[in-house]
Amino acid sequence: MRVLTVAAMRRVDAAAIDGGIPGIRLMEAAGTEVAERAQARLPKGGRVLVLCGPGNNGGDGFVVARLLAERGYTVELRLLGERAALTGDAALAAEAWTGPVQPAEADALPPCDLVIDALFGAGLSRDLDGAARALVESVNAGGRPVLAVDVPSGVDGDTGAVRGVAIKAVETVTFVAFKPGHLLQPGRSLCGHRHLADIGTGEAALEVGLAVATPSLYRNGPELWSKTFPRLTGESHKYTRGHALVLSGPATKTGAARLAARGALRVGAGLVTLASPQAALAENAAQLTAIMLRPCETADDLDDLLTDERLNVVLAGPGLGTGEPTRERVAVAAAAGRSLVLDADALTSFSGQAPLLAAHLTDGDAQAVLTPHEGEFARLFKGTEATAEGADKVARTRAAAALTGAVVVLKGSDTVIASPDGRATINDHGSPYLGTAGSGDVLGGLIAGLLAQGMPPFEAAAAGVWLHGDAGLRHGPGLIAEDIPELMPVVLGDLVEAGLM
């Protein structure tokens, strides 16, 4: 589950070589893995175009070309740069290739069944221009399927950003560990199917890379949070499973809070109460059964409600309304020391006032999870390090978490969850069908329900995002927000079956 930066991955390679594994052996192993994946995509005796760059990524390409030729495929190899300029292991790999080497020219690419992109790896540090840019554009325009080595050429391995222009691959083979660029957009989409291969660097070398990859970055999944996931015993009952309080907006704006409340209940909270203005009680009552109702007009009313210590989590934001009344409710809930999930209107109410929100959370020693989408994030953290120009999504989310002292869930197709201690995880377990009205409200409810059951905030947020994504993947086309809570029994049931909760 650990994700390594490009620098950390270089340390792994160096440690493996220092430990006695020749670099050319690692290159041969990498090329073998790529050749295996290429063979799975090729017709018998198919034509392959291998595009090699001037560095070690190109060296991998020479190995792939040799192996595929030995297996009976028709291979043409094109090199961007001069063969005489190759050094180190790449030069050794090139020596073992006995076929012709032609220049990689954008206007002279032959027809083929598959392109092997071994031009530039994850460590690309500049935008592609000139002949390299023209070559990448030609490959994309040609419509040939591309298998990329390490990352599609032009993708920044640390951020997923496109360095000028980038290859669009159908599959990417990478080695030892995923890099952030494999998980963050747009790199993730450009990778196509991602295949992670072990090339024999060994555990000791990996530990060297992990030691320098601090704070920790993970790929989100059950292995990250299953040990803290709530488990029922023979002594469990509704009061041991927590009581979530969801704040509802006024009449005609209650749907978002109901979706959140349903999510909290379905993920296992023992009790869920929806607190709404008196005028909205009938509207909510007409559509709720297991979820309880309480009147709540003002921050003072909320303060009175929270004298009940069993209400251990407060979710505020969905449909609540923006402005001073919402800021006052958040301040009251934080001062009461409850775990908080803040979304939507609760975040927008603090636009440009992230330090004020942080002060409320600190004063009450409240454990909080903030769940903004990009627009809410930009408004809340305007003028702070979290919105610094050029910062990648992981860096921005970490900065926001450090500033507020809260776990921050920066939503999107590549949702990033970060803790104030620097830990972060990237979620790639999801579906574009989740982009529908109310979906984010349900996510807030899932996280609140897990917090209510005693899950730590970082793990609760990561688990909620993964469960939410799993529901989207299971349902597919036609998904609406109401479907997500109803899929939880199947999602959770499979985790139980797998022994992960």
Image (spheres, rainbow, N blue to C red):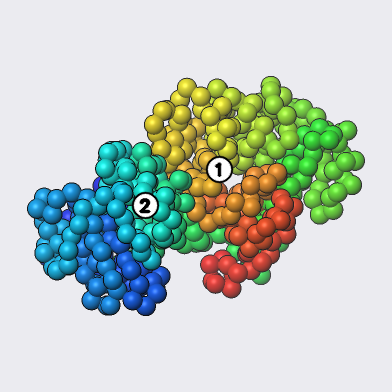
Query: In terms of sequence position, does the residue under pointer 2 or pointer 1 come before the other?
Result: 2
On the image, the x and y values in percent for residue 153 come to: 33, 50
Query: Above or below — where is 23 with respect to 422?
Result: below
Res. 476 visible in picture:
yes
Q: Residue at x 62, y 37 (%)?
A: 342
Res. 57 visible in picture:
no
Q: Which residue is mark 2?
A: 139
| Quarter of the N terminus within the rendering | bottom left
Query: Above or below — where is 33 with respect to 187?
Result: below
Circle 1: is it few (<14), some (14-19), or many (20+) Cα within 10 Å? some
Q: Residue at x 70, y 44 (%)?
A: 437
Q: Nearer the viewer, residue 69 or 490?
A: 69
Taking the image as shown, residue 323 lies to the left or right of residue 32, namely: right
| Quarter of the C terminus within the rendering | bottom right
Query: Above or below — where is 439 with respect to 350?
Result: below
Three-letter amino acid code of the residue under disc 2: Val
Q: Nearer the viewer, residue 360 or 441?
A: 441
Asked where in the image residue 268 lies, by quadrant, the reply is: bottom right
Q: Which residue is mark 1?
A: 411
Q: CA distance from mark 2 to mark 1?
A: 32 Å
Query: Above or below — where is 115 with respect to 130?
Result: below
Circle 2: is it few (<14), some (14-19), or many (20+) Cα within 10 Å? many
On the image, the x and y values in percent for residue 353 come to: 55, 23
Q: Residue at x 50, y 47 (%)?
A: 414
